[in-house]
Amino acid sequence: MSDDRDANDGRDPADDPPATGRTTADRILETIEALEVEYVFGYPGGRAIELFESIGHGETDVSVIRPRDEREASVMAEAYGRMTGSPAVLAGQGPWIGSLGAIGQMEARLGSSPMVVLTEASERGDYSTLAPYQQSRGDYGGLSLPKILDGITKEWWFPRTPTETVRSVQLAFKHATAGRNGPCAVILDGNAVTDSFPDESTPAVWDDGKQVRNWESKPTDGDVEAAHDALVAADRPVILAGNGVHAAEAYDELEAAAETYDAVVATSYLGKSTIPETHERAAGVIGSFGHEGANRVVSEADVLLVVGCRLNPMDSNWQAESFIRPDEQTILHADVDSRNAGWVYPADVGLIGDARETLAALVAAAGEADGEVDGSRTGAGENGWALERAATAREDFSVPECESDDVPIKPQRVCKAVEAVLDENTVVTADSGNNRFWLLNYLQTRDTGSYYGSGGVGAMGWAAPAAVTAALLGNDAICVAGDGGFAMTMTALETAVDCGVAPAFVVMNDTSLGMVRQMDEGMPGTEFHDTDFVGVARALGGDGVRVDDPADLEGAVRDAKAADVPTVVDVRIDREEDMAETLSSSFYDAVGGLHE
Protein backbone atom coordinates (compact mmCIF):
# COMPACT_ATOMS: atom_id res chain seq x y z
CA MET A 1 0.00 0.00 0.00
CA SER A 2 1.37 3.41 -0.91
CA ASP A 3 2.10 5.95 1.83
CA ASP A 4 -0.56 8.40 0.62
CA ARG A 5 -3.48 6.09 1.42
CA ASP A 6 -5.42 5.96 4.66
CA ALA A 7 -4.23 2.93 6.60
CA ASN A 8 -7.64 2.33 8.13
CA ASP A 9 -9.90 2.04 5.11
CA GLY A 10 -7.83 2.07 1.95
CA ARG A 11 -9.24 5.32 0.54
CA ASP A 12 -7.16 7.71 -1.47
CA PRO A 13 -7.50 11.16 0.19
CA ALA A 14 -7.28 12.76 -3.25
CA ASP A 15 -10.66 11.22 -4.08
CA ASP A 16 -12.41 12.73 -1.04
CA PRO A 17 -14.94 15.57 -1.57
CA PRO A 18 -13.94 19.00 -0.32
CA ALA A 19 -13.98 19.26 3.49
CA THR A 20 -16.34 21.63 5.25
CA GLY A 21 -14.54 22.01 8.56
CA ARG A 22 -17.31 20.10 10.35
CA THR A 23 -17.28 16.42 11.18
CA THR A 24 -19.96 13.90 10.36
CA ALA A 25 -20.93 13.97 14.05
CA ASP A 26 -21.49 17.72 13.74
CA ARG A 27 -23.67 17.14 10.67
CA ILE A 28 -25.71 14.48 12.54
CA LEU A 29 -26.36 17.06 15.24
CA GLU A 30 -27.59 19.46 12.55
CA THR A 31 -30.07 16.80 11.43
CA ILE A 32 -31.26 16.24 14.98
CA GLU A 33 -31.69 19.98 15.49
CA ALA A 34 -33.47 20.46 12.17
CA LEU A 35 -35.96 17.75 13.12
CA GLU A 36 -36.61 19.51 16.44
CA VAL A 37 -35.51 16.59 18.59
CA GLU A 38 -35.73 17.62 22.24
CA TYR A 39 -33.81 14.86 23.96
CA VAL A 40 -30.96 12.45 23.44
CA PHE A 41 -31.27 9.75 26.10
CA GLY A 42 -28.07 7.82 26.50
CA TYR A 43 -24.73 7.01 27.96
CA PRO A 44 -21.46 8.29 26.45
CA GLY A 45 -19.18 5.51 25.25
CA GLY A 46 -17.36 4.11 22.25
CA ARG A 47 -17.54 6.15 19.07
CA ALA A 48 -20.90 7.58 20.13
CA ILE A 49 -18.77 9.89 22.26
CA GLU A 50 -18.23 12.06 19.18
CA LEU A 51 -21.96 12.77 19.00
CA PHE A 52 -22.07 13.68 22.69
CA GLU A 53 -19.05 15.94 22.17
CA SER A 54 -20.77 17.74 19.28
CA ILE A 55 -23.81 18.36 21.46
CA GLY A 56 -21.69 19.52 24.38
CA HIS A 57 -19.50 21.87 22.36
CA GLY A 58 -22.18 23.37 20.16
CA GLU A 59 -24.92 25.91 20.74
CA THR A 60 -27.96 23.70 20.64
CA ASP A 61 -31.39 23.24 22.16
CA VAL A 62 -30.93 19.46 22.21
CA SER A 63 -30.70 18.18 25.78
CA VAL A 64 -28.78 15.09 26.83
CA ILE A 65 -30.41 12.98 29.54
CA ARG A 66 -27.90 10.57 31.04
CA PRO A 67 -29.66 8.05 33.31
CA ARG A 68 -27.81 5.45 35.33
CA ASP A 69 -27.67 2.86 32.53
CA GLU A 70 -28.74 2.10 28.97
CA ARG A 71 -31.84 0.19 30.03
CA GLU A 72 -33.22 3.23 31.78
CA ALA A 73 -32.25 5.43 28.82
CA SER A 74 -33.97 3.11 26.34
CA VAL A 75 -37.21 3.09 28.33
CA MET A 76 -37.18 6.88 28.63
CA ALA A 77 -36.71 7.21 24.86
CA GLU A 78 -39.49 4.71 24.17
CA ALA A 79 -41.87 6.43 26.58
CA TYR A 80 -41.14 9.78 24.92
CA GLY A 81 -42.06 8.35 21.53
CA ARG A 82 -45.23 6.74 22.84
CA MET A 83 -46.41 9.86 24.66
CA THR A 84 -45.59 12.39 21.92
CA GLY A 85 -45.71 10.44 18.65
CA SER A 86 -42.27 11.85 17.77
CA PRO A 87 -38.98 9.99 18.08
CA ALA A 88 -36.38 10.82 20.67
CA VAL A 89 -32.82 9.54 20.28
CA LEU A 90 -31.27 6.69 22.22
CA ALA A 91 -27.47 6.91 21.97
CA GLY A 92 -24.57 4.95 23.38
CA GLN A 93 -21.94 2.29 22.91
CA GLY A 94 -22.93 -0.70 20.79
CA PRO A 95 -22.58 -3.67 23.14
CA TRP A 96 -24.64 -1.97 25.82
CA ILE A 97 -27.26 -0.45 23.54
CA GLY A 98 -27.70 -3.97 22.14
CA SER A 99 -28.03 -5.59 25.57
CA LEU A 100 -29.15 -3.37 28.44
CA GLY A 101 -30.71 -0.94 25.96
CA ALA A 102 -32.65 -3.69 24.19
CA ILE A 103 -35.51 -3.42 26.71
CA GLY A 104 -36.83 -0.09 25.45
CA GLN A 105 -36.25 -1.06 21.84
CA MET A 106 -38.27 -4.26 22.21
CA GLU A 107 -41.06 -2.35 23.93
CA ALA A 108 -41.00 0.18 21.08
CA ARG A 109 -41.04 -2.56 18.43
CA LEU A 110 -44.04 -4.43 19.83
CA GLY A 111 -45.74 -1.33 21.25
CA SER A 112 -45.36 0.75 18.06
CA SER A 113 -43.39 3.65 19.55
CA PRO A 114 -41.13 5.78 17.33
CA MET A 115 -37.46 5.87 18.35
CA VAL A 116 -34.10 6.53 16.67
CA VAL A 117 -31.08 4.64 17.99
CA LEU A 118 -27.60 6.02 17.28
CA THR A 119 -24.96 3.54 18.32
CA GLU A 120 -21.65 2.09 17.10
CA ALA A 121 -19.71 -1.16 16.79
CA SER A 122 -16.74 -0.24 19.03
CA GLU A 123 -14.25 -0.62 16.18
CA ARG A 124 -10.67 0.44 16.69
CA GLY A 125 -9.22 0.92 13.25
CA ASP A 126 -7.15 -2.02 12.01
CA TYR A 127 -7.52 -3.86 15.32
CA SER A 128 -10.99 -5.16 14.42
CA THR A 129 -9.51 -8.30 12.81
CA LEU A 130 -7.61 -9.23 15.97
CA ALA A 131 -9.09 -11.00 18.99
CA PRO A 132 -11.79 -8.43 19.73
CA TYR A 133 -12.52 -6.41 22.83
CA GLN A 134 -16.09 -5.01 22.74
CA GLN A 135 -15.98 -5.00 18.91
CA SER A 136 -19.43 -5.88 17.62
CA ARG A 137 -19.35 -5.66 13.82
CA GLY A 138 -20.45 -9.28 13.58
CA ASP A 139 -17.39 -10.76 11.90
CA TYR A 140 -15.20 -13.54 13.27
CA GLY A 141 -14.53 -13.52 16.99
CA GLY A 142 -16.73 -10.57 17.80
CA LEU A 143 -20.29 -9.84 18.81
CA SER A 144 -22.92 -9.13 16.17
CA LEU A 145 -24.73 -5.89 16.90
CA PRO A 146 -26.35 -5.97 13.41
CA LYS A 147 -27.96 -9.33 14.23
CA ILE A 148 -29.20 -8.06 17.58
CA LEU A 149 -30.68 -4.92 16.05
CA ASP A 150 -32.19 -6.90 13.20
CA GLY A 151 -34.18 -8.84 15.77
CA ILE A 152 -35.46 -5.93 17.85
CA THR A 153 -35.74 -2.88 15.57
CA LYS A 154 -38.00 -1.99 12.69
CA GLU A 155 -35.07 -1.05 10.41
CA TRP A 156 -31.30 -0.61 10.83
CA TRP A 157 -28.35 0.76 8.84
CA PHE A 158 -24.55 0.31 9.06
CA PRO A 159 -23.12 3.16 6.92
CA ARG A 160 -19.39 3.49 6.22
CA THR A 161 -18.98 7.01 4.78
CA PRO A 162 -20.01 10.49 5.94
CA THR A 163 -22.65 10.79 3.22
CA GLU A 164 -24.10 7.36 3.94
CA THR A 165 -24.12 8.13 7.64
CA VAL A 166 -26.17 11.31 7.45
CA ARG A 167 -28.54 9.83 4.89
CA SER A 168 -28.98 6.79 7.17
CA VAL A 169 -29.81 9.01 10.14
CA GLN A 170 -32.38 10.86 8.05
CA LEU A 171 -33.93 7.57 6.92
CA ALA A 172 -34.02 6.29 10.49
CA PHE A 173 -36.19 9.26 11.45
CA LYS A 174 -38.35 8.77 8.37
CA HIS A 175 -38.98 5.06 8.92
CA ALA A 176 -39.51 5.44 12.68
CA THR A 177 -42.79 7.24 11.92
CA ALA A 178 -43.70 5.69 8.54
CA GLY A 179 -46.77 3.48 8.75
CA ARG A 180 -46.66 1.59 12.02
CA ASN A 181 -44.25 3.43 14.31
CA GLY A 182 -41.18 1.68 15.66
CA PRO A 183 -37.48 1.89 16.58
CA CYS A 184 -34.88 2.41 13.84
CA ALA A 185 -31.13 2.20 14.39
CA VAL A 186 -27.92 3.47 12.82
CA ILE A 187 -24.58 1.85 13.67
CA LEU A 188 -22.00 4.59 13.33
CA ASP A 189 -18.64 3.77 11.74
CA GLY A 190 -15.67 4.85 13.83
CA ASN A 191 -13.85 6.57 10.96
CA ALA A 192 -16.86 8.03 9.19
CA VAL A 193 -18.25 9.74 12.27
CA THR A 194 -15.01 11.70 12.80
CA ASP A 195 -14.33 12.45 9.13
CA SER A 196 -14.99 15.88 7.68
CA PHE A 197 -18.38 16.14 6.06
CA PRO A 198 -18.27 17.14 2.35
CA ASP A 199 -19.97 20.20 0.91
CA GLU A 200 -21.22 18.16 -2.04
CA SER A 201 -21.55 14.46 -2.67
CA THR A 202 -23.10 11.91 -4.97
CA PRO A 203 -25.63 10.81 -3.95
CA ALA A 204 -26.69 14.13 -2.54
CA VAL A 205 -27.69 14.73 1.06
CA TRP A 206 -31.02 16.51 0.88
CA ASP A 207 -32.68 18.92 3.27
CA ASP A 208 -33.41 17.09 6.52
CA GLY A 209 -37.05 18.07 6.79
CA LYS A 210 -37.82 17.16 3.19
CA GLN A 211 -35.97 13.85 3.36
CA VAL A 212 -37.80 12.56 6.44
CA ARG A 213 -41.28 13.72 5.45
CA ASN A 214 -44.08 11.13 5.64
CA TRP A 215 -47.69 11.16 4.53
CA GLU A 216 -50.67 9.84 6.46
CA SER A 217 -52.60 7.05 4.77
CA LYS A 218 -56.34 6.57 4.81
CA PRO A 219 -58.68 3.76 3.71
CA THR A 220 -60.27 3.61 0.31
CA ASP A 221 -63.67 5.16 -0.28
CA GLY A 222 -65.12 1.72 -1.02
CA ASP A 223 -63.93 0.26 2.28
CA VAL A 224 -65.20 3.29 4.20
CA GLU A 225 -68.60 2.95 2.52
CA ALA A 226 -68.79 -0.77 3.33
CA ALA A 227 -67.87 -0.15 6.96
CA HIS A 228 -70.36 2.72 7.20
CA ASP A 229 -73.15 0.54 5.83
CA ALA A 230 -72.39 -2.19 8.35
CA LEU A 231 -72.33 0.25 11.28
CA VAL A 232 -75.61 1.90 10.22
CA ALA A 233 -77.30 -1.48 9.99
CA ALA A 234 -75.97 -2.64 13.37
CA ASP A 235 -78.20 -3.15 16.38
CA ARG A 236 -75.29 -3.47 18.81
CA PRO A 237 -72.21 -1.68 17.38
CA VAL A 238 -69.04 -1.73 19.49
CA ILE A 239 -65.71 0.01 18.87
CA LEU A 240 -62.60 -1.65 20.26
CA ALA A 241 -59.87 0.99 20.57
CA GLY A 242 -56.21 0.01 20.78
CA ASN A 243 -52.81 1.64 20.97
CA GLY A 244 -53.14 2.87 17.39
CA VAL A 245 -55.60 5.51 18.65
CA HIS A 246 -52.90 6.77 21.03
CA ALA A 247 -50.31 6.71 18.24
CA ALA A 248 -52.52 8.82 15.95
CA GLU A 249 -53.85 10.99 18.80
CA ALA A 250 -57.28 10.18 17.40
CA TYR A 251 -59.11 10.86 20.66
CA ASP A 252 -61.64 13.35 19.35
CA GLU A 253 -62.29 11.25 16.25
CA LEU A 254 -62.90 8.15 18.39
CA GLU A 255 -65.54 9.92 20.47
CA ALA A 256 -67.11 11.40 17.34
CA ALA A 257 -67.36 7.98 15.68
CA ALA A 258 -68.90 6.47 18.80
CA GLU A 259 -71.50 9.25 18.94
CA THR A 260 -72.18 9.10 15.22
CA TYR A 261 -72.84 5.36 15.16
CA ASP A 262 -74.32 5.09 18.68
CA ALA A 263 -71.59 2.64 19.66
CA VAL A 264 -70.06 1.45 22.91
CA VAL A 265 -66.26 1.88 23.22
CA ALA A 266 -64.12 -0.77 24.90
CA THR A 267 -60.32 -0.65 24.86
CA SER A 268 -57.42 -3.03 24.81
CA TYR A 269 -54.86 -2.84 27.61
CA LEU A 270 -52.56 -0.61 25.53
CA GLY A 271 -55.61 1.38 24.46
CA LYS A 272 -56.57 2.32 28.02
CA SER A 273 -57.25 6.09 28.21
CA THR A 274 -57.92 6.44 24.47
CA ILE A 275 -61.36 7.48 25.73
CA PRO A 276 -62.04 8.84 29.23
CA GLU A 277 -63.26 5.85 31.20
CA THR A 278 -65.87 8.10 32.79
CA HIS A 279 -67.38 8.80 29.34
CA GLU A 280 -70.98 7.66 28.92
CA ARG A 281 -69.97 5.33 26.07
CA ALA A 282 -66.89 3.84 27.72
CA ALA A 283 -67.12 0.20 28.82
CA GLY A 284 -63.62 -0.41 30.18
CA VAL A 285 -60.79 -2.76 29.23
CA ILE A 286 -61.22 -6.12 27.55
CA GLY A 287 -59.09 -9.23 27.87
CA SER A 288 -58.25 -12.13 30.11
CA PHE A 289 -57.43 -9.72 32.94
CA GLY A 290 -59.92 -7.06 31.91
CA HIS A 291 -63.44 -6.09 32.88
CA GLU A 292 -66.32 -8.55 32.86
CA GLY A 293 -68.64 -5.89 31.44
CA ALA A 294 -66.27 -4.87 28.64
CA ASN A 295 -65.75 -8.50 27.64
CA ARG A 296 -69.49 -9.07 27.64
CA VAL A 297 -70.17 -5.98 25.51
CA VAL A 298 -67.69 -7.13 22.85
CA SER A 299 -69.21 -10.60 22.90
CA GLU A 300 -72.71 -9.16 22.44
CA ALA A 301 -71.77 -6.90 19.50
CA ASP A 302 -73.24 -7.66 16.12
CA VAL A 303 -70.75 -5.27 14.45
CA LEU A 304 -67.29 -4.85 15.93
CA LEU A 305 -65.04 -2.01 14.72
CA VAL A 306 -61.46 -2.73 15.84
CA VAL A 307 -59.22 0.35 15.61
CA GLY A 308 -55.44 0.12 16.01
CA CYS A 309 -55.44 -3.14 17.97
CA ARG A 310 -53.71 -6.34 16.86
CA LEU A 311 -55.82 -8.50 19.22
CA ASN A 312 -53.01 -10.29 21.00
CA PRO A 313 -53.79 -13.46 23.01
CA MET A 314 -54.64 -11.62 26.25
CA ASP A 315 -56.83 -9.15 24.33
CA SER A 316 -58.70 -12.03 22.73
CA ASN A 317 -59.16 -13.94 25.99
CA TRP A 318 -56.91 -16.67 24.66
CA GLN A 319 -59.29 -17.18 21.73
CA ALA A 320 -62.29 -18.08 23.88
CA GLU A 321 -64.90 -19.35 21.42
CA SER A 322 -67.72 -17.28 22.86
CA PHE A 323 -65.80 -13.97 22.87
CA ILE A 324 -65.21 -12.82 19.28
CA ARG A 325 -66.99 -14.93 16.67
CA PRO A 326 -66.25 -14.07 13.02
CA ASP A 327 -68.99 -16.43 11.80
CA GLU A 328 -71.65 -14.53 13.76
CA GLN A 329 -70.28 -10.98 14.04
CA THR A 330 -69.34 -8.47 11.35
CA ILE A 331 -65.73 -7.46 11.97
CA LEU A 332 -64.35 -4.18 10.65
CA HIS A 333 -60.61 -3.94 11.30
CA ALA A 334 -58.84 -0.57 11.00
CA ASP A 335 -55.05 -0.55 11.17
CA VAL A 336 -52.20 1.44 9.67
CA ASP A 337 -50.55 -1.83 8.60
CA SER A 338 -52.54 -4.00 6.20
CA ARG A 339 -50.90 -7.11 7.64
CA ASN A 340 -52.57 -6.50 11.01
CA ALA A 341 -56.11 -6.15 9.68
CA GLY A 342 -57.70 -9.59 9.79
CA TRP A 343 -54.52 -11.07 11.28
CA VAL A 344 -56.10 -12.84 14.27
CA TYR A 345 -59.75 -12.97 13.23
CA PRO A 346 -60.95 -12.82 9.60
CA ALA A 347 -62.21 -9.32 8.86
CA ASP A 348 -65.23 -8.48 6.73
CA VAL A 349 -63.80 -5.03 5.92
CA GLY A 350 -60.23 -3.82 6.26
CA LEU A 351 -59.73 -0.09 6.78
CA ILE A 352 -56.06 0.50 6.08
CA GLY A 353 -54.73 3.82 7.26
CA ASP A 354 -53.97 6.14 10.14
CA ALA A 355 -56.53 5.80 12.93
CA ARG A 356 -57.40 9.48 12.94
CA GLU A 357 -57.89 9.55 9.16
CA THR A 358 -59.98 6.37 9.31
CA LEU A 359 -62.29 7.47 12.10
CA ALA A 360 -62.70 10.91 10.54
CA ALA A 361 -63.60 9.27 7.23
CA LEU A 362 -66.27 7.15 8.90
CA VAL A 363 -67.78 10.22 10.58
CA ALA A 364 -67.71 12.12 7.28
CA ALA A 365 -69.34 9.20 5.46
CA ALA A 366 -72.23 9.33 7.91
CA GLY A 367 -72.70 13.03 7.29
CA GLU A 368 -72.83 12.45 3.55
CA ALA A 369 -75.33 9.61 3.69
CA ASP A 370 -78.54 11.58 3.14
CA GLY A 371 -79.50 11.77 6.78
CA GLU A 372 -79.12 8.06 7.57
CA VAL A 373 -77.00 9.11 10.54
CA ASP A 374 -77.16 12.59 12.03
CA GLY A 375 -75.26 12.14 15.28
CA SER A 376 -78.30 10.78 17.18
CA ARG A 377 -78.80 7.53 15.36
CA THR A 378 -82.29 6.13 14.84
CA GLY A 379 -83.19 2.47 15.12
CA ALA A 380 -80.94 0.80 17.67
CA GLY A 381 -80.24 4.07 19.42
CA GLU A 382 -83.88 4.47 20.38
CA ASN A 383 -83.77 1.57 22.80
CA GLY A 384 -80.67 2.92 24.51
CA TRP A 385 -78.66 -0.32 24.25
CA ALA A 386 -75.27 1.39 23.92
CA LEU A 387 -75.56 3.81 26.82
CA GLU A 388 -77.26 1.28 29.05
CA ARG A 389 -74.66 -1.44 28.41
CA ALA A 390 -71.76 0.99 28.81
CA ALA A 391 -73.12 2.25 32.12
CA THR A 392 -73.51 -1.29 33.41
CA ALA A 393 -70.00 -2.20 32.27
CA ARG A 394 -68.46 0.79 34.08
CA GLU A 395 -69.72 -0.56 37.39
CA ASP A 396 -66.77 -2.97 37.22
CA PHE A 397 -64.38 -0.14 38.07
CA SER A 398 -65.48 -0.32 41.69
CA VAL A 399 -65.72 -3.28 44.08
CA PRO A 400 -66.02 -3.32 47.89
CA GLU A 401 -62.26 -3.84 48.25
CA CYS A 402 -61.73 -0.37 46.75
CA GLU A 403 -63.08 1.11 50.00
CA SER A 404 -61.71 -1.52 52.36
CA ASP A 405 -60.10 -0.45 55.63
CA ASP A 406 -58.34 -3.79 55.97
CA VAL A 407 -54.69 -3.98 56.98
CA PRO A 408 -52.60 -4.95 55.05
CA ILE A 409 -53.96 -2.58 52.43
CA LYS A 410 -55.98 -4.02 49.55
CA PRO A 411 -54.38 -3.33 46.15
CA GLN A 412 -57.77 -2.23 44.84
CA ARG A 413 -57.75 0.60 47.38
CA VAL A 414 -54.31 1.70 46.17
CA CYS A 415 -55.77 2.12 42.69
CA LYS A 416 -58.56 4.33 44.03
CA ALA A 417 -56.06 6.43 45.99
CA VAL A 418 -54.17 7.12 42.77
CA GLU A 419 -57.44 7.80 40.95
CA ALA A 420 -58.47 10.32 43.60
CA VAL A 421 -55.53 12.61 42.80
CA LEU A 422 -55.87 12.53 39.01
CA ASP A 423 -56.41 15.73 37.06
CA GLU A 424 -56.04 16.69 33.42
CA ASN A 425 -52.28 17.22 33.83
CA THR A 426 -51.52 13.85 35.44
CA VAL A 427 -50.05 10.84 33.63
CA VAL A 428 -49.89 7.40 35.25
CA THR A 429 -47.25 4.89 34.15
CA ALA A 430 -47.82 1.25 35.09
CA ASP A 431 -45.28 -1.53 35.34
CA SER A 432 -45.57 -5.19 34.44
CA GLY A 433 -47.01 -7.67 36.93
CA ASN A 434 -50.02 -7.70 39.23
CA ASN A 435 -49.95 -3.91 39.65
CA ARG A 436 -50.90 -3.19 36.06
CA PHE A 437 -53.85 -5.57 36.13
CA TRP A 438 -55.16 -4.06 39.34
CA LEU A 439 -54.77 -0.64 37.73
CA LEU A 440 -56.48 -1.42 34.46
CA ASN A 441 -59.49 -2.77 36.38
CA TYR A 442 -59.85 -0.24 39.19
CA LEU A 443 -58.14 2.97 38.06
CA GLN A 444 -60.83 4.81 36.08
CA THR A 445 -59.15 7.43 33.89
CA ARG A 446 -60.83 10.79 33.35
CA ASP A 447 -58.72 12.12 30.48
CA THR A 448 -57.29 10.82 27.23
CA GLY A 449 -53.59 10.07 27.01
CA SER A 450 -53.37 9.86 30.79
CA TYR A 451 -52.34 6.23 31.28
CA TYR A 452 -49.51 4.22 29.73
CA GLY A 453 -48.33 0.78 30.72
CA SER A 454 -45.65 -1.73 29.91
CA GLY A 455 -47.38 -3.90 27.37
CA GLY A 456 -45.45 -4.03 24.11
CA VAL A 457 -43.12 -6.71 25.40
CA GLY A 458 -44.32 -6.33 29.00
CA ALA A 459 -41.01 -5.47 30.64
CA MET A 460 -40.68 -5.07 34.39
CA GLY A 461 -38.88 -1.89 35.41
CA TRP A 462 -40.58 0.18 32.68
CA ALA A 463 -42.81 2.42 34.78
CA ALA A 464 -40.20 4.36 36.79
CA PRO A 465 -38.09 5.68 33.86
CA ALA A 466 -41.30 6.27 31.87
CA ALA A 467 -42.63 8.45 34.70
CA VAL A 468 -39.48 10.57 34.56
CA THR A 469 -40.10 11.09 30.84
CA ALA A 470 -43.72 12.04 31.52
CA ALA A 471 -42.49 14.59 34.04
CA LEU A 472 -39.95 15.98 31.56
CA LEU A 473 -42.88 16.56 29.20
CA GLY A 474 -44.50 18.82 31.80
CA ASN A 475 -46.93 16.39 33.39
CA ASP A 476 -47.56 15.48 36.99
CA ALA A 477 -46.36 11.90 36.75
CA ILE A 478 -47.21 8.95 38.95
CA CYS A 479 -45.34 5.67 38.52
CA VAL A 480 -47.14 2.62 39.91
CA ALA A 481 -45.05 -0.53 40.23
CA GLY A 482 -44.60 -3.62 42.32
CA ASP A 483 -41.59 -3.81 44.57
CA GLY A 484 -39.89 -6.21 42.14
CA GLY A 485 -40.21 -3.95 39.11
CA PHE A 486 -39.45 -0.76 41.02
CA ALA A 487 -36.21 -2.20 42.41
CA MET A 488 -35.02 -2.92 38.86
CA THR A 489 -34.95 0.76 37.85
CA MET A 490 -35.29 2.73 41.08
CA THR A 491 -32.20 4.69 40.04
CA ALA A 492 -34.68 6.55 37.81
CA LEU A 493 -35.42 8.54 40.96
CA GLU A 494 -31.88 9.92 40.85
CA THR A 495 -32.33 10.70 37.15
CA ALA A 496 -35.41 12.70 38.10
CA VAL A 497 -33.36 14.60 40.68
CA ASP A 498 -30.67 15.34 38.06
CA CYS A 499 -33.34 16.59 35.65
CA GLY A 500 -35.12 18.75 38.21
CA VAL A 501 -38.47 16.92 37.94
CA ALA A 502 -40.49 15.29 40.69
CA PRO A 503 -42.62 12.31 39.73
CA ALA A 504 -44.29 10.24 42.44
CA PHE A 505 -43.46 6.54 42.74
CA VAL A 506 -46.23 4.41 44.27
CA VAL A 507 -44.88 0.96 45.13
CA MET A 508 -47.37 -1.87 45.69
CA ASN A 509 -45.10 -3.75 48.04
CA ASP A 510 -45.73 -7.40 48.89
CA THR A 511 -41.99 -8.20 49.24
CA SER A 512 -42.23 -10.69 46.39
CA LEU A 513 -42.77 -11.28 42.71
CA GLY A 514 -46.47 -11.35 43.48
CA MET A 515 -47.89 -12.49 40.16
CA VAL A 516 -45.52 -15.45 39.87
CA ARG A 517 -45.72 -16.32 43.58
CA GLN A 518 -49.50 -16.48 43.41
CA MET A 519 -49.26 -19.06 40.63
CA ASP A 520 -47.48 -21.47 42.99
CA GLU A 521 -46.68 -20.60 46.61
CA GLY A 522 -43.86 -23.15 46.57
CA MET A 523 -42.11 -21.68 43.54
CA PRO A 524 -38.50 -20.69 44.29
CA GLY A 525 -37.11 -17.26 43.47
CA THR A 526 -40.22 -15.24 44.22
CA GLU A 527 -39.47 -13.79 47.68
CA PHE A 528 -37.51 -10.61 48.49
CA HIS A 529 -36.15 -9.28 51.74
CA ASP A 530 -37.90 -6.16 52.98
CA THR A 531 -36.13 -3.30 51.17
CA ASP A 532 -36.21 0.15 52.76
CA PHE A 533 -37.42 2.06 49.70
CA VAL A 534 -37.89 5.21 51.76
CA GLY A 535 -34.23 5.10 52.73
CA VAL A 536 -33.23 4.40 49.14
CA ALA A 537 -35.27 7.38 47.93
CA ARG A 538 -33.62 9.73 50.39
CA ALA A 539 -30.15 8.40 49.55
CA LEU A 540 -30.81 9.15 45.87
CA GLY A 541 -31.87 12.73 46.58
CA GLY A 542 -35.62 12.29 46.88
CA ASP A 543 -37.99 11.54 49.70
CA GLY A 544 -40.39 8.82 50.73
CA VAL A 545 -43.01 7.56 53.14
CA ARG A 546 -44.13 4.09 54.15
CA VAL A 547 -47.89 3.55 54.34
CA ASP A 548 -49.42 0.69 56.35
CA ASP A 549 -52.78 2.23 57.24
CA PRO A 550 -55.33 2.74 54.42
CA ALA A 551 -56.51 5.93 56.14
CA ASP A 552 -53.13 7.50 55.34
CA LEU A 553 -52.97 6.30 51.76
CA GLU A 554 -54.70 8.99 49.68
CA GLY A 555 -53.02 11.81 51.57
CA ALA A 556 -49.61 10.24 51.05
CA VAL A 557 -50.16 9.88 47.30
CA ARG A 558 -51.48 13.44 47.07
CA ASP A 559 -48.49 14.81 48.98
CA ALA A 560 -46.06 12.83 46.80
CA LYS A 561 -47.68 14.18 43.65
CA ALA A 562 -47.35 17.75 44.97
CA ALA A 563 -43.80 17.36 46.31
CA ASP A 564 -40.86 19.34 44.96
CA VAL A 565 -38.62 16.27 44.88
CA PRO A 566 -39.31 12.77 43.53
CA THR A 567 -41.09 10.87 46.28
CA VAL A 568 -41.71 7.20 46.95
CA VAL A 569 -44.93 5.99 48.57
CA ASP A 570 -44.12 2.49 49.84
CA VAL A 571 -47.55 0.87 50.28
CA ARG A 572 -47.67 -2.43 52.14
CA ILE A 573 -50.37 -4.37 50.29
CA ASP A 574 -52.18 -7.59 51.14
CA ARG A 575 -50.04 -10.26 49.53
CA GLU A 576 -52.88 -12.77 49.84
CA GLU A 577 -55.21 -10.79 47.55
CA ASP A 578 -54.95 -13.05 44.51
CA MET A 579 -55.09 -11.01 41.31
CA ALA A 580 -55.43 -13.90 38.85
CA GLU A 581 -58.14 -15.66 40.83
CA THR A 582 -60.13 -12.46 41.36
CA LEU A 583 -60.00 -11.27 37.76
CA SER A 584 -60.10 -14.57 35.90
CA SER A 585 -63.35 -15.49 37.62
CA SER A 586 -64.84 -12.30 36.18
CA PHE A 587 -63.60 -13.31 32.74
CA TYR A 588 -65.24 -16.71 32.85
CA ASP A 589 -68.48 -15.20 34.11
CA ALA A 590 -68.33 -12.75 31.20
CA VAL A 591 -67.80 -15.09 28.27
CA GLY A 592 -68.53 -18.59 29.45
CA GLY A 593 -71.67 -20.02 27.93
CA LEU A 594 -72.98 -16.75 26.50
CA HIS A 595 -73.55 -18.22 23.05
CA GLU A 596 -74.05 -21.93 23.56
Image (cartoon, helix red, strand yellow):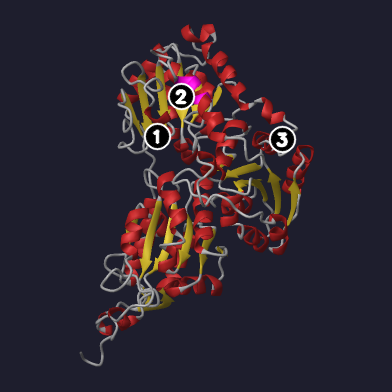
Q: Mark 2: which secondary structure?
A: strand
Residue 314, position in %: x, y?
A: 43, 34
Q: Which residue is identified by label 2?
A: 239
Name above or below for residue 426 compared with residue 541: above
**Residue for point 47% across, 35% down:** 245
Neighbours of disc 1 within 10 Å: few (<14), some (14-19), many (20+): few
Q: Does the magenta segment cover residue 28?
A: no
The residues bearing labels 3 and 1 have C-alpha atoms spaced at a distance of 32 Å
Q: Residue furthest bottom?
A: 3
Marked residue nearer the N-terminal end (3 or 1): 1
- The magenta region covers 586-591
Q: Which of 590 and 337 is in front in this view?
A: 590
Q: Mark 1: which secondary structure?
A: loop
**Residue for point 70% across, 52% down:** 568
Marked residue nearer the N-terminal end (2 or 1): 2
Main secondary structure found in the magenta portion: helix
Q: Quadrant of the N terminus?
A: bottom left
Q: Residue 591 carries which label?
A: none
Q: In which quarter of the image is residue 197?
A: bottom left
Q: Which residue is identified by label 1?
A: 313
Q: Which amino acid does label 1 sit on?
A: Pro
Mark 2 or mark 1: which is in front? 1
Q: In which quarter of the image is the C terminus?
A: top left
Neighbours of disc 2 within 10 Å: few (<14), some (14-19), many (20+): many
Marked residue nearer the N-terminal end (2 or 3): 2
Residue 221, position in %: x, y?
A: 33, 26
Residue 499, position in %: x, y?
A: 65, 61
Q: Mark 3: which secondary structure?
A: helix
Mark count? 3
The residues bearing labels 2 and 1 have C-alpha atoms spaced at a distance of 18 Å
Q: Which of 34 and 311 is in front in this view?
A: 311
Q: Residue 420 carries which label?
A: 3
